[in-house]
Image (spheres, rainbow, N blue to C red):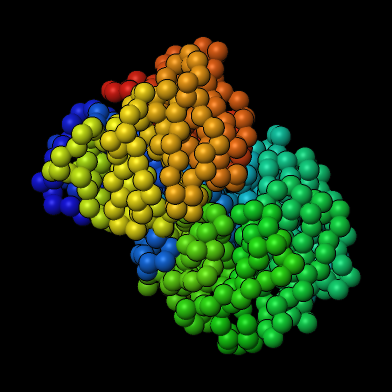
């Protein structure tokens, strides 16, 4: 953290007015500001891989937590019920998350709409239209949007609802669906599916709001293509008939990977046609007593699966990690840096490079990678985390983990927040760091030929670039200098920059739409020397194709080696567009206007905006 005196410029009314849009608790660095400027900063603002905002001469860039540094996770304040273990969590946006588990022979879900500042706990037949009278486990949750969530689980109760008797109890599997973000389950327009004689259900994955898969005991896989209204059992290889399928991840509606175990060891199933047919993949050789418990596929080709090797019944052995880059045909074993008794139970990959996995017994463990699993680092976990069961990453700098605490005989729920941090850069080149974002230097106090207009972080958060209006690039930390337009003739000033997915190159964009490429950033075309109805104001990288979009102030979008998904060009705008940001999901982007309006295209979700709200100062760029 920089000395407190250097933070005084951030107390300007315009800067703080913009920060108010980000609603979350203010860092201690703002304690010297008076009460009128101590507005909350939203977790959404901290949840962006690279956030560039120019506010009254100040640039904000969110630096992702480095997944190859031992970062510290924190317990979310007021985040869990008094009793109850949490088994899974799904966060469709930076502000909304739904966690599920069970609570002292009951069951519940816990929902937040404000990034974890407050959680609402639900449970009971009034919510789920089902009177479970004994032990019930909500073990899987997937929310493809802030409105729709699919919940899977099982119960043993004394209500005679089916023939699968276990002593005096009846085993029942169920799926619940909500279409209003969990406010109601089982009401009008929502679905409850009860399999009275069915197996246990363990996990669920929704590639879209229509396409979901549920997996469970005895090789069971169910699929829906209508948002959970109807479900169909899938035909799986006979060798998996008696397997426990513990986890599923669908990168697209067609491409899914399921993992689990049977008496012969680990099980991996893949489909590339939405479950019409399944292939039993070869489990890595020389791995005995393998149980796979978690899987995450950020793309159809790239997946990470985790689990346990050893005698699970005695909790001996260790956690294990495997990764594939060819859709599951072959898997490479990763090196687990520490012993993980009880194994690894869940994994979430925000990208092909950044993944988090967790588990542990009598002590929660979180491991992280920022290089596609080549190396894993053990994160610092609070001692109160007895074990950890589920994790969900909106992006690599915004993850939430759930499990159980040591309270109440190990039956207390716990929710952890990943390390976050962000950087502020003034137009004079000064840089200020907050949270876990490290300070690596700045141009503050040095001569600049032109003001700073943009900033970007490296993928692992260990460095950053500043760009000036004359095209000068200044690199700090592990951000390499690949060249710049500084000292060269420009027909129009530079207005922003974007970094390639691997951080080994960048683009500069000028107000006339000219593009300048450096490092491994490829030139795919520009709007330079072409007629524009309005000046270009921003650029964003499409991490899927490696291309880029630029946007003009009238909302026109220009795509280069990136899918054109629509724009606001020629449409009425209350205020001009000021920036563009790639969506969290593949194949989408958001446009941001100066009144806080958000316009989404492709798979980029709409999670709310400040449009129609009264702002003390205009928004001048965007968040992704």
Question: Would you place residue 240 above or below residue 9 in this image?
Answer: below
In the shown orientation, is residue 165 left or right of residue 456? right
Given residues 137 and 608, the one toward you in this image is 608
Q: Residue furthest front?
A: 488
The answer to whether residue 597 of the structure is visible from this angle is no
Question: Percent position (x, y) of residue 76?
Answer: 39, 56
In the shown orientation, is residue 474 left or right of residue 170? left
Question: Would you place residue 132 above or below residue 209 in this image?
Answer: below
Specify the quadrant of the image occupied by residue 182: top right
Q: Residue at x 13, y 43 (%)?
A: 445
In the shown orientation, is residue 507 left or right of residue 139? left
Given residues 294 and 323, the one toward you in this image is 323
Given residues 603 and 563, the one toward you in this image is 563
The answer to whether residue 547 of the structure is visible from this angle is yes
Given residues 277 and 225, the one toward you in this image is 277
Q: Residue at x 52, y 43 (%)?
A: 522
Question: Would you place residue 519 above or below residue 604 in this image?
Answer: below
Question: Percent position (x, y) of residue 148?
Answer: 63, 41
Q: Residue at x 73, y 56 (%)?
A: 256
Q: Residue at x 68, y 57 (%)?
A: 301
Picture quarter with the N terminus: bottom left
How many numbered discs sit on the rendered protein?
Answer: 0
Question: Percent position (x, y) of residue 378?
Answer: 43, 72
Question: Percent position (x, y) of residue 428?
Answer: 19, 37
Question: Would you place residue 385 above or below residue 130 in this image?
Answer: below
């Amino acid at each position: 953290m920089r000395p407190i005196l250097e933070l005084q410029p951030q107390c300007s009314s315009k800067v703080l007015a913009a920060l108010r849009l980000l609603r979350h608790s203010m860092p201690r660095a703002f304690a010297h500001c008076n009460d009128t400027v101590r507005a909350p900063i939203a977790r959404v603002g901290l949840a962006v891989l690279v956030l560039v905002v120019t506010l009254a001469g100040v640039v904000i860039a969110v630096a992702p937590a480095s997944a190859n540094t031992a970062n510290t996770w924190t317990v979310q304040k007021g985040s869990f019920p008094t009793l109850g273990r949490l088994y899974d969590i799904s966060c469709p946006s930076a502000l909304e998350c739904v966690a599920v588990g069970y609570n002292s022979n009951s069951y519940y879900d816990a929902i937040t709409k404000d990034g974890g500042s407050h959680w609402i706990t639900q449970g009971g037949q009034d919510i789920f239209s089902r009177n479970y009278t004994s032990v019930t486990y909500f073990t899987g949750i997937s929310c493809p949007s802030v409105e729709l969530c699919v919940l899977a689980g099982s119960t043993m109760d004394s209500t005679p609802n089916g023939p699968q008797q276990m002593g005096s109890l009846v085993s029942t599997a169920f799926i619940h669906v909500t279409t209003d973000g969990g406010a109601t389950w089982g009401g009008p327009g929502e679905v409850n599916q009860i399999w009275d004689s069915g197996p246990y259900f363990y996990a669920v994955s929704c590639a879209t709001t229509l396409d979901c898969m549920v997996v469970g005991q005895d090789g069971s896989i169910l699929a829906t293509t209508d948002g959970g209204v109807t479900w169909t059992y899938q035909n799986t290889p006979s060798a998996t008939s008696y397997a426990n399928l513990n986890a599923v991840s669908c990168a697209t509606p067609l491409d899914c990977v399921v993992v689990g175990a049977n008496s012969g060891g680990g099980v991996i199933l893949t489909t590339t046609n939405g479950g019409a047919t399944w292939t039993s993949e070869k489990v890595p050789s020389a791995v005995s007593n393998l149980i796979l418990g978690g899987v995450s596929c950020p793309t159809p080709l790239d997946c990470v699966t985790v689990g346990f090797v050893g005698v699970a019944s005695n909790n001996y052995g260790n956690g294990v990690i495997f990764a594939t880059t060819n859709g599951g045909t072959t898997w490479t074993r990763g090196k687990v840096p520490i012993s993980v008794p009880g194994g690894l139970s869940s994994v979430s990959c925000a990208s092909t490079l950044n993944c988090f996995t967790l588990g542990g017994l009598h002590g929660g463990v979180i491991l992280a990678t920022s290089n596609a699993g080549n190396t894993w680092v053990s994160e610092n976990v609070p001692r109160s985390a007895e074990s950890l069961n589920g994790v969900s990453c909106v992006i690599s700098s915004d993850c939430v983990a759930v499990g159980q605490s040591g309270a109440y005989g190990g039956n207390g729920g716990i929710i952890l927040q990943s390390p976050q941090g962000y950087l502020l850069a003034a137009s004079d080149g000064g840089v200020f760091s907050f949270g876990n974002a490290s300070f690596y230097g700045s141009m503050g106090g040095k001569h600049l030929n032109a003001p700073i207009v943009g900033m970007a972080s490296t993928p692992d958060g260990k460095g950053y670039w500043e760009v000036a209006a004359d095209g000068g690039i200044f690199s700090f930390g592990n951000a390499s200098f690949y060249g710049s337009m500084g000292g060269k003739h420009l027909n129009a000033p530079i207005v922003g920059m974007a970094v390639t997915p691997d951080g080994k190159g960048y683009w500069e964009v000028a107000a006339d739409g000219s593009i300048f490429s450096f490092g491994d950033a490829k030139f795919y075309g520009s709007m330079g020397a072409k007629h524009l109805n309005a000046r270009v104001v921003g650029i964003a990288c499409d991490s899927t194709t490696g291309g880029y979009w630029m946007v003009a102030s009238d909302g026109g979008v220009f795509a280069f080696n990136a899918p054109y998904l629509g724009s606001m060009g020629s449409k009425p705008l209350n205020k001009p567009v000021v920036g563009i940001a790639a969506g969290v999901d593949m194949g989408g982007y958001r446009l941001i206007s100066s009144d806080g309006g958000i316009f989404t295209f492709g798979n980029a979700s709409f999670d709310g905006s400040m449009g129609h709200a009264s702002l003390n100062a205009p928004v001048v760029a965007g968040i992704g």
